[in-house]
Amino acid sequence: MERLETDVLVIGAGAAGLVSALDLEMYDVVVLAKAPAGEGSSSAWAQGGIAAAVGKDDHPAHHKRDTLDVGVELSCEKAAHVITYEGPALIDALINWGVNFDRTDEGDLCLGREAAHSFRRILHADGDSTGKEIMRALGQAVQNSDHIRLISDATAYDLIEKNGRVIGARASRHDGQKVTIFAKAVVMATGGIGSLFGYTTNPEESCGEGLAMAARVGAKLADLEFVQFHPTAIDVGVKPMPLATEALRGEGAHLIDSRGVRFMPSVHKDAELAPRDVVARAIWRRVKAGEKVYLDCREAVGADFKNRFPTVYGYCMEAGLDPTTHPIPVTPAAHYHMGGVDVDLNGRTSVDGLWAVGEVACTGVHGANRLASNSLLEAVVFGRRVAKDIQAVKAIDVKFEDANAETSGSLDLSDQLASVLYGAAGVERHEAGLYTALVKVVGWEEKQDSFSPSFKNKLMAAKMILACALERSESRGGHFRSDYPDTDAEQAHRSKTSLKEIDAFIRGLNIGVNIQGTIQSCQTLA
Ligand code: FAD
Ligand code: SIN
């Protein structure tokens, strides 16, 4: 067993974790991740770009308005203020770390357009390789720093808690070696939950483990039912699904059905640039009815595709499909978690010693839906805020002692879990489906001891999402209930909860009693 001590442990090496780590230069920082910086993170796969009000006629107030509008009454106004007003400074910071955003011949930043943004304000790099470029620069800055130790072959599976304070984490290196890291402050930056779902744009590393670890030590959670499905994941049988960036629709690409008919103008006044959930549902309904849906870029992008969108072009060509001459088959896929570990405006969780940042956290900024390209922005703005807050904490005297770790097995049912979750908590949800899935997951939980630590975390994350989706009996943003298709003004509030409360809710459903008679009990609910 390897044992390390540090001032700050950052779990996750995406944009959020690396910005926090880089800004903590007066401390010894260990960054622990499943893969080297630039790999195994959604940050590295980001295409469209990062939003910030840096255009001539734009203003953070406009950006804030757009952010709040898309959140369907649930966005936290203060958090929206923070990311939109502090955004431009973080763009400067990224440029200082060496990020080369695309520029015009005159040297001005090129600004793209995406759905529900009232101005062109999406900064991008190498066309659609924004995340790769940001992570290249941040990774380089980490290498050049002498305060960060990077462990990039380990999966954290448990937080260590002592007298109500988080003092470290347990992890497993890819060669099976266990490692315990003690720290005065722990930053959870493990990204999202996409790969818990059968269809996703996320890397397999984004599977909700950080959410579960934080929940287990009692951290408050928020808005877990709100999952964003990206409308245009490329449907060519590849897992995870490559993304066809929204920026293509921003440039005028159309969605068409198998007869070549454009359908979005009859669904929403903004057609292809309607909010993501609206577009995703319109596509999903066609796919569910057995139709194929395509993104037609032939006219809007045409021969320029390879230069302007090299990443998407590469994905298409690998699948034997030339997007300059053929429409791209698309379907919605789990893309982003609006919910997460509940944090304040400094990224503090409800548990001492634990901060959360990036997609694993819920600042509340996205409400029930997320404006495109606001996620990288939130990751870097709050990455810096977390670092500042940790510096403000008075020196604490922590005794680094570990309690006994739980024993566990090696069984992993991730594929089965992914198909259960996509089926029940996908683009359209309903009570009977959610209930059946919960019964299954709770049944699996009873076999805890045989599961790998990682799968236990995935199972817990899935359970919490299902329970929260079952509890919200309305449709709002990314959460659509076919049995409650309307938005209910009475439910215009965020869902603040905890693992304890979720388990109490599930106990109230009498699932334990119903496991044997699942189908019967679901029929009565349906
Ligand atoms: P990530 O970048 O996902 O990093 C998480 C890190 O945690 C990784 O290093 C991972 O290996 C590590 N990790 C996870 N679990 C563990 C564990 N148990 N132990 C140790 N390490 C762990 N947003 C935008 O704003 N603009 C875009 O253009 C955009 N495009 C996107 C395109 C794609 C294909 C995807 C998937 C997402 C896109 N998003 C975009 C969303 C955005 O990329 C993410 O929300 C954001 O990058 C999350 O950053 P993060 O640092 O929180 O997490
Ligand atoms: C995309 O490029 O379409 C993804 C942008 C985002 O998720 O913000």
Image: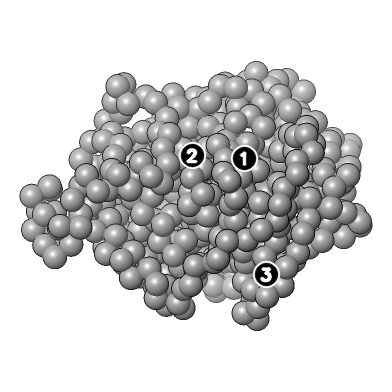
- Within 10 Å of disc 1 (Cα), the crowding (few <14, some 14-19, many 20+) is some
Going from N to C along the chain, the mark reached first, 3 or 2, is: 3
Instruction: Give the alpha-carbon distance from disc 3 to disc 2, as whole Å.
Output: 27 Å
- What type is the residue that disc 2 sits on? Lys
Mark carried by residue 179: 3
Q: Which residue is at 28% across, 43% downward? A: 505
Percent coordinates x, y for residue 294 in the rendering:
44, 56
Percent coordinates x, y for residue 92 in the rendering:
84, 36
- What type is the residue that disc 1 sits on? Asp
Pointer 1: what residue?
352
Going from N to C along the chain, the mark reached first, 1 or 2, is: 2
Label 3 secondary element: strand
Q: Which residue is at 36% across, 41% downward? A: 501
Percent coordinates x, y for residue 304 in the rendering:
68, 54
Pointer 2: what residue?
220
- Within 10 Å of disc 3 (Cα), the crowding (few <14, some 14-19, many 20+) is some
Side of 514 relative to 108 (left or right):
left
Instruction: Give the alpha-carbon distance from disc 3 to disc 1, as whole Å.
Output: 22 Å
Q: Which residue is at 60% across, 27% downward? A: 79
Is label 3 in contact with label 1 (beta carbons under 8 Å)?
no
Q: Quadrant of residue 223?
A: top left
